[in-house]
Image: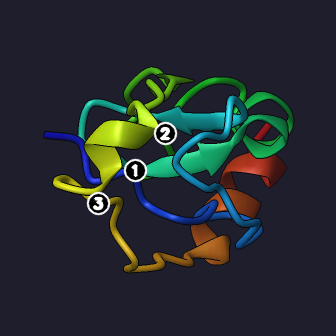
Amino acid sequence: MLQLRPSCECCDRDLPPESPDAMICSFECTFCRACAERALAGRCPNCGGELVRRPIRPPERLAKAPASRERVFKPEGCRAKAQAP
């Protein structure tokens, strides 16, 4: 089951479970659409994997399978990727 992390690893923007702007890689690293497209060019700075739109868990399922509350914030990886040639 996906963790549905609550924020963008690059800019720390809130990404609630129902957000259509959340993007993830196969390791569930989570980014907002703006960072994924602009700073990261669609690739995860942690694993190099493709970033795709995170599915939305139906609200009635969140009660039994809540989203993660753990925020991961690693802006240094995003800056390095954005500055690469």
Q: Nearer the viewer, mark 1 or mark 2?
A: 1
Q: Nearer the viewer, mark 1 or mark 3?
A: 3
User: Residue flagged by tag 3: what amino acid is it?
Assistant: Pro
> Cα distance, mark 1 to mark 3?
17 Å
What's the residue at 68%, 29% (across, down)?
Answer: 20
For the C terminus, the quadrant is top right
What's the residue at 42%, 60% (across, down)?
Answer: 5
Counting other residues with Cα less than 10 Å from the Cα at mark 1, is it few (<14), some (14-19), or many (20 or more)?
many
Counting other residues with Cα less than 10 Å from the Cα at mark 2, is it few (<14), some (14-19), or many (20 or more)?
many
Q: Is residue 37 left or right of residue 49?
A: right
Q: Tell me the colour scheme of the image.
A: rainbow
Query: Dot 1 corresponds to which residue?
Result: 29
What's the residue at 67%, 49% (across, down)?
Answer: 81
- Indicate whether 37 appears above or below 70: above
- Near-viewer residue (10 or 81): 10
What's the residue at 76%, 66% (across, down)?
Answer: 13
User: Residue flagged by tag 1: what amino acid is it?
Assistant: Cys
Q: Secondary structure at mark 1?
A: loop
Q: Secondary structure at mark 2?
A: loop
> Cα distance, mark 1 to mark 2?
7 Å
- Indicate whether 74 appears above or below 52: below
Check if mark 1's residue and mark 3's residue have beta carbons within 8 Å: no
Which is nearer the N-term, disc 1 or disc 2?
Answer: 1
Counting other residues with Cα less than 10 Å from the Cα at mark 3, is it few (<14), some (14-19), or many (20 or more)?
some
Query: Dot 2 corresponds to which residue?
Result: 44
Q: Disc number at residue 66? A: 3
User: Residue flagged by tag 2: what amino acid is it?
Assistant: Cys
